[in-house]
Image (cartoon, rainbow, N blue to C red):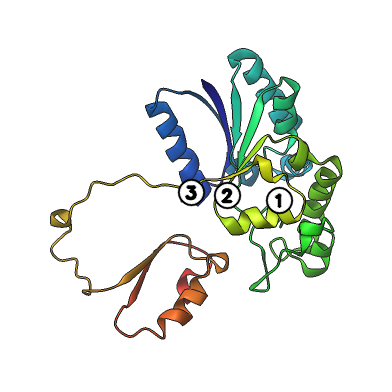
């Protein structure tokens, strides 16, 4: 079997979860003897572009002719059995789904977040759960400045997702959705995604092989403790975790990670 694995990496130095899953799963597939053709772009390209380049790439977020062409060329040359998409936003764009479908390549998408429901991918507004845009009325984002607290950027993103909602890109161009939990599956089913095309698969981490004897002697820990290991952002629920642990006296929490609210927790 040959799999074309496609992913929009975040930024150099980022430890984003979907980047790590992409790398781990690609490595695992290769270890199991499956031929993998990786195709990636990275958001550094946008950061390093000039004003004109940024405008062109912003337009390309709706439909990237560049990535459509490159995926098309890869498919014609490599003839993969499956295209597995991790993250397409912002630079790859949904155009890559159409490139695969043009050549009858089956498309599998791992949904690392709730972007098909909430274009911001966080399902949060003002620190509270919000999935209202599941109804397709994305332009409410402009009123609230949902995307990076910017009404203009919210308008751009809302327009992109409205266009692809009308075209039903995420409904018709993907053959199988890999979800991470039951809540995500329920959200998708509630807005009309075919439940027969949805499967649940948890992420994994490799065994580091570190034994207790290898832990440095000067590294002291309490007898009982709990660890939060991940990106420290509002959407991860770290503040809820803090409130819960305020009620637990004998099991102190420890956190390890980086994020937008790291200095406030």
Q: Quadrant of residue 234?
A: bottom right
Residue receiving disc 2: 112
Looking at the rendered structure, the number of numbered marks drawn on it comes to 3
> Residue visible at 73% across and 38% down?
94
Categorize mark 2 by other alpha carbons within 10 Å: few (<14), some (14-19), many (20+): some
Q: CA distance from mark 3 to mark 1?
A: 19 Å
Residue, far top: 77
Marks 1 and 2 close (CB-CB < 8 Å):
no
Q: Nearer the viewer, residue 147 or 175?
A: 175
Q: Residue at x 68, y 46 (%)?
A: 195
Residue 120 visible in image:
no
Q: Is residue 56 left or right of residue 5?
A: right
The residue nearer to you, when weighing 41 against 222, is 222
Position of residue 61 measured from the top left corner of the image (x, y, whole percent):
74, 42
Residue at 67% across / 41% down in the picture? 196
Q: Earlier in the sequence, mark 2 or mark 3?
A: 2
**Label 1: element kind:** loop
The quarter in which the C terminus is drawn is bottom left
Q: Is residue 31 left or right of residue 83?
A: left
Tell me the CA gap for discs 1 and 2.
Answer: 10 Å
Nearest to the eye among marks 2 and 3: give it.
Answer: 3
The residue labelled by disc 3 is: 202
Residue 225: horizontal and vertical position, in percent? 29, 72
Helix, strand or loop for disc 2: loop
Q: Residues within 10 Å of mark 1 (few under 14, many from 20)?
A: many
């Amino acid at each position: 079997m040959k799999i074309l694995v496609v992913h929009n990496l975040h930024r150099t130095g980022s430890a984003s979860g979907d980047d790590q899953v992409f790398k781990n799963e690609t490595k695992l597939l290769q270890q199991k003897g499956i031929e993998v053709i990786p195709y990636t772009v990275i958001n550094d390209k946008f950061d390093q572009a000039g004003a004109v380049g940024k405008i062109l790439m912003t337009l390309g977020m709706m439909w990237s002719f560049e990535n459509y062409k490159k995926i098309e060329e890869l498919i014609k040359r490599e003839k993969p059995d499956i295209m597995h998409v991790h993250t397409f936003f912002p630079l790859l764009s949904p155009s890559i789904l159409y490139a695969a479908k043009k050549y009858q390549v089956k498309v599998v998408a791992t949904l690392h977040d709730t972007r098909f429901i909430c274009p911001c991918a966080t399902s949060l507004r003002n620190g509270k759960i919000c999935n209202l845009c599941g109804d397709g009325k994305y332009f409410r984002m402009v009123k609230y400045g949902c995307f990076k607290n910017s009404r203009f950027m919210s308008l751009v993103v809302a327009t992109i997702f409205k266009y692809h909602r009308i075209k039903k890109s995420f409904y018709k161009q993907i053959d199988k959705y890999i979800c991470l939990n039951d809540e995500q599956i329920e959200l998708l089913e509630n807005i009309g995604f075919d439940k027969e095309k949805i499967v649940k698969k948890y992420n994994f981490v490799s065994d580091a092989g570190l034994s207790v004897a290898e832990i440095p002697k000067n590294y002291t820990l309490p007898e009982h403790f709990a660890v939060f290991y991940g990106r420290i952002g509002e959407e991860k629920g770290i503040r809820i975790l803090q409130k819960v642990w305020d009620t637990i006296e004998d099991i102190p929490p420890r956190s390890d990670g980086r994020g937008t609210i790291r200095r406030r927790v």
